[in-house]
Image: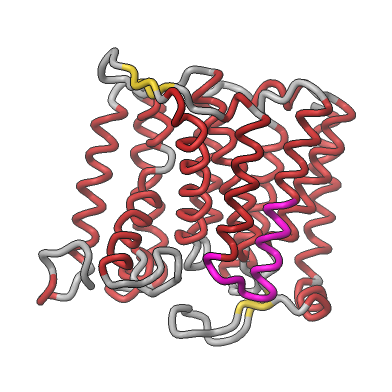
Amino acid sequence: MVNYFFFFLIIFFINFLLFYNTEIIAKKLNIFDKPSKIKHQKIKVPSIGGLYLFINLILAILYFSFIDFRIFADTYFIYDLKQLLIFLILLISIFLIGLYDDKYNLYANTKLVFLIPLLFLIVYVDEGLKVDTLSFTFNSFELTLNRTSTIFSVLCLLAYLNCINMFDGINLQTSLNVILILLIFQISINRFDPLLFTIILFLLHFSYYNYKSKIFLGDSGTLVLAFLLGYILIKSHNILFIKSDIIFSFTIFPVMDMIRLTFKRIIKGKHPFVGDNDHIHHRLMRKKNLRFAILTTFISIGIPLVINVITEYKYSIYLITLSFIFYIFIIIFTSDKKNNLSIFKQ
């Protein structure tokens, strides 16, 4: 723990220097999130939070791999240097795609062209990411995927990358909810993970500046966070034999919003991954204000997770059902009076 404390102290001062010089770094890189019809900010904001997160992760991986390589086996099921290098190559590639998107605004289809082969590659080389069966807490039935397991695993990762990216629409929303998910996950597996704790410390620091609209995560940040969370959750499902509905309970709210928006956009003849201002946080902001939107999404995600931990995930399926009902209620509550019977309309 002394070695961990020393690292966390160093990373705190590195983050302090990075965030203090955000404007200078953003100007040199020319990476800003500019105002538009679907964004709530009125000025351009540095979109380099993902770069800072990546620096934190690389430093943590290098440091902990030298002092205690076993931490990668405990949570990430990485047992040798070769597996770690493969993980790093994929992490770096996904980060660079996101960073390029932050700077040059990639088309949605172009981003998919780069992401899909990368996800197929990591599922192909890492058997621990291949979902072969789905099992549930509420019955003994198991669904065997057989030949579709690789495609299913890639689709799960791709969907999660997109849903977290879509969920990141207002200040604090992504950072606070990821902090909560990481804390709940570590409590659930009854294990302290210094790499995940590094992310939590970064996100706490980031949240302070993000609340003041001084910095955004950008696509590079949301893609890296989603990749790490998806990677850990799928491996926990496959190797620790955590039931499928328990894993889904960690993702339920952003996934439901992505599904609704995807169907709505397809019905309207739009690309399912092209942004708009009908995300659940946008609707809550229009109905009340920013704080109301942040608090509502945080409570909606947090309460089921906390209850799940307290009850040792015995009622996971019921809490997922309640989350779904509450989500539908929010959509109806935030709809215009003329259209309040449809979850696919504003």
- What residue is at 65 percent from the left and 46 percent from the top? 118
Residue at (26%, 20%) from the top-left corner? Answer: 138
Q: How many marks?
A: 0
Answer above or below: position of 68 versus 158: above
Return the residue nearer the eye: 74 or 292. 74
Q: Residue at x 61, y 71 (%)?
A: 106
- Residue 297 location (% of width, % of height): 37, 55
Residue 137: x and y in percent read 32, 20
Answer left or right for 317 relative to 146.
left
Compared with 211, 136 (above or below) is above
Pick out the residue farthest to the front.
Answer: 147
- Horizontal side of 234 relative to 297 (left or right) equals right
> Which quadrant holds residue 261?
bottom left
Residue at the far top: name it.
140
Q: Position of residue 191 (x, y in %)?
A: 62, 23
Residue situated in front as seen by the camera: 41 or 76: 76
The part of the chain drawn in magenta is 93-109
207 relative position to 11: left or right: left
Quarter of the image that includes the N terminus: top right
Image quarter (top left, top right, bottom left or bottom right) of the C terminus: bottom left
Q: Is residue 292 above or below residue 131?
A: below
Q: Is residue 153 above or below residue 77?
A: below
Between residues 47 and 123, which one lies in front from this camera angle?
A: 123
**Residue 255 screen position, x and y as percent:** 38, 49
Q: Is residue 103 magenta?
A: yes
Q: Is residue 100 magenta?
A: yes
